[in-house]
Amino acid sequence: MQIKGKEFVGFISEERIQHTIKALASEINKEYAGRTPVFLPVLNGAFMFAADLIKEITLPSKVSFVKISSYDGMSSTGQFKTLIGLDESLFKQDILIVEDIVDTGLTLQKIITELDSLGTGSVEVVTLLRKKTARNKGVNVKFTGFDIEDEFVLGYGLDYDGLGRNHRQLFRAVKKV
């Protein structure tokens, strides 16, 4: 598949994604039994993952969305833009940040710091994908769907310059040799 002159090939099937989401939800249901977590999906990329994940959650829970961005094209800018979308108090709430992908972890760390300053009860992260860079830096992610290498992926909510989010599976960019 080509998008804006870049070649992408199939990477993780829809079936594998859905199986992994069910397993993540099962872990969360056990870990948060007796509590009412607030799921905080980070838009735009996490919307598909968050929707499928939350459908599998059997706990009483809340959902609130936030939006930030640190990407330009196929690489992270490392620049954190203001966290917008928090319309309710998160004081003493158990927060689960829902991410599509943890790349460098810089933006995630800034979100966690901002949420901690609001007096949250706890803040944990659930992500569909975690890149090698984030693992090497020891970025704290409690629930991870897939660990991947440092490669560019799209589909299932992830995009390349706004395109490709609508695919049900994940694709990775082909590196030109």
Image: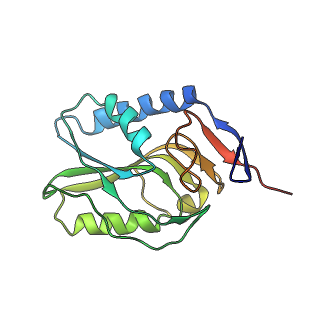
- Circle count: 0
Figure quadrant of residue 54: top left
Q: Is residue 44 above or below residue 76?
A: above
| x and y percentages locating residue 85 in the rendered image | 25, 58
| x and y percentages locating residue 87 in the rendered image | 17, 56
Q: Residue at x 68, y 53 (%)?
A: 4
Observer-nearest of 162 and 42: 162
Observer-nearest of 107 and 69: 69
Observer-nearest of 75 and 102: 75
Q: Is residue 36 above or below residue 65?
A: above
Residue ranking furthest to the bottom: 79
24 sits to left or right of 19: left
State which quarter of the image contains the N terminus: top right
Q: Residue at x 46, y 61 (%)?
A: 139
Q: Residue at x 50, y 52 (%)?
A: 101
51 sits to left or right of 71: left
